[in-house]
Image: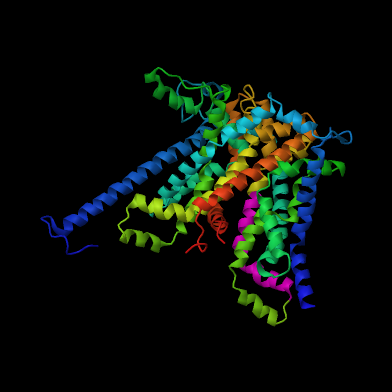
Amino acid sequence: MRERQRNLQGWLFVSPWIAGFLMFTLYPILTSLYYSFCDYRVLTPPRWVGLANYVALLTDRDYFLPSLWNTFFMMIELPLALIIGLTMALLLNHKIPGIGVFRTIYYLPSIMPVVAVAVLWLWVLNPQYGLLNAVLTPVLAPFGLQPPGWLADPSWSKPAFIMMDLWAVGGSVVIYLASLQNVPAHLYEAAEIDGAGAWHKTVNVTLPMISPVIFYNLIMGVIWTFQYFTQTFIMTQGGPQNSTLFYALYLFYNAFRDFRMGHACAMAWILFVLTLVATLVVFRTSARWVYYEGERG
Amino acid sequence: MATGTLSKTNGLTGWRQSRVWRRRIAVTAVYLVLVALSVSFLAPFGLMVSTSLKTEDRIFTETIEWIPNPIRWQNYAEALQSFPFLLYLRNTLFVCALVVVGTVLSSALPAYGFARLRWKGRDVLFLIMLATIMLPAQVTMLPVFVLFRTIGWTGTYLPLVVPPFFGSAFAIFLLRQFFLTIPQELSDAARIDGCSEWRIFWQIIVPLSIPALATVALFAFIGAWTDFINPLVYLTDESTYTLAVGLQTFVGRHSSEWNLLMAAATVVTLPLMVVFFFTQKLFIEGITLTGIKG
């Protein structure tokens, strides 16, 4: 009786989440799988078409495949954000006066509403009068070069987005910083006794100790990249020449502009499988480079 | 320090001094890098504020004028007029309030169940919940949209404010991590006194968890304030817009009036900055809590 009561109590406390999970996660996942095999235009009931949506997408060289490629391209941002974020966190980890002010400054861009960031960067990236090119023009002039048109130029639009995102790297800096401060001091002391310098301490103590956080950030980064939407929706609407037509944006267009729910749901499911595969790959390789305390010695 | 072993001509003090100097140089180098980075991080903000105060003819200049001359405060008044800021602010605050209340309430209860009670199926459910944090929103968004459309909720705030009342996986995870740090003896003592779990939750755990609950509230607030795609999809009447969607429509209408656009962007950003300055500690604590330990 006590056993049953205890179980009931547990389920009762968790019940709000269970209800939410069934309504807003499980039901939609299964329904979107069904829709992905249908021709569904919202206003008329879904009609079964088998694999037609998937075939149409995977052979679509004009929109779908470019959107996938564009999204993969944006993954360049992940190692960049990792290196820059870690370097900044290591800098901020010095116990010197005024360090809190710097931490706040670096964090600020990451709490700015994305819509406001997009508006601001439209101006920063303006090819003629923008801040970025005002800085670059005198630097490039001696080499006879001119700064690119950024969002107006298909080959520079994605790097422009990457730069804008790196401006908001502060969010992960704070996470790295928190994990740096969790590294036990005695490990550094031991390394010092063994004669390790700053570089060796970073590579042999710090990085292994914070590798779980790096790992987590990497996975979330992959997922985040696939959901990249607001910035491109506001700033470029996918242009120029579809160079910033990212996965989530094309999915949105399918669902809410062209009302092709079947197509959009097939895209959602391909995305689901891709994230799953990406996560598994990172997980499988993580044993080699992620160190969990308590797992081994 | 290796005293005694050094007996060269300049002696111990000289060695110490060179060490002090080396440290000073290192600290100066760190400061220089920190300042250089700060300048590049702050420059866009500076540009935003300075452009927002310029007259139309001073915006497009050969070199950037950081100090606007003349200063035109009128831009803010104009931006707020062509963009019903107060109305959108009210809408945003209304949505934020409900989202915060819903998220905190409905995440604390499951978090308690996951952290402080032992029952069959707990660990499996917890794993499933963790997995949903990684689920891309796009996978669930479309059928949920169809569902809300079918029951006639599009064009209302209900799709924005009802789901939070079913908990957020991230908030549950964060609170669970915090609840785990509260000594089990407190609950055991209360149980011996015949306290129900419900009372233990309300009278012991909740009062001890105010900082963690505040962190969750803060994250929920910022999430709701900056949310773009949901208001975009569900709000159809312009008078119901939130600030994020309102700002986007504003961009569409004033695409090259950079002074007005920057004024609007400043106004949408400012409240969040103010909130951040007063709650910095909570932020850092929340991030440390989810610092992927345990």
Is residue B136 a member of the stretch shown in magenta?
A: no
Q: Position of residue A176 (x, y in %)?
A: 49, 51
- Residue A67's place in the image compared with A270, above or below, is above
Q: Position of B211 compared to B86: left or right?
A: left
| Residue B274 appearing in the image | no
Q: Is residue A66 above or below residue B232?
A: above
Residue B186 figure quarter: bottom right
Relative depth, front residue between B223 and A205: A205
Q: Which residues are magenta?
A: B196-221
Inspect this view and state whether residue A190 appears: yes
What number of labels is visible? 0
Q: Measuring 61% from the left and 67% from the top, which residue is drawn there?
A: B180
x, y percent for residue A44 = 89, 33
- Left-right relation of B243 to B54: right
Relative to A121, residue B99 above or below: below
Nearer to the camera, B106 or A192: A192
Colouring chosen for the image of the structure: rainbow
Q: Is residue B200 magenta?
A: yes
Q: Residue furthest bottom?
A: B193
Residue A89 relative to residue B123: left or right: left
Q: Quadrant of the N terminus of chain A?
A: bottom right
Q: Quadrant of residue B264?
A: top right
**Residue at image coords 67%, 27%:** B252
Farthest residue to the top: give it: A144
Q: Can you give x and y, in whole percent of width and height, for residue A278 in the image?
A: 61, 43
Task: Tell me which secondary structure the magenta stretch mostly adopts.
Answer: helix
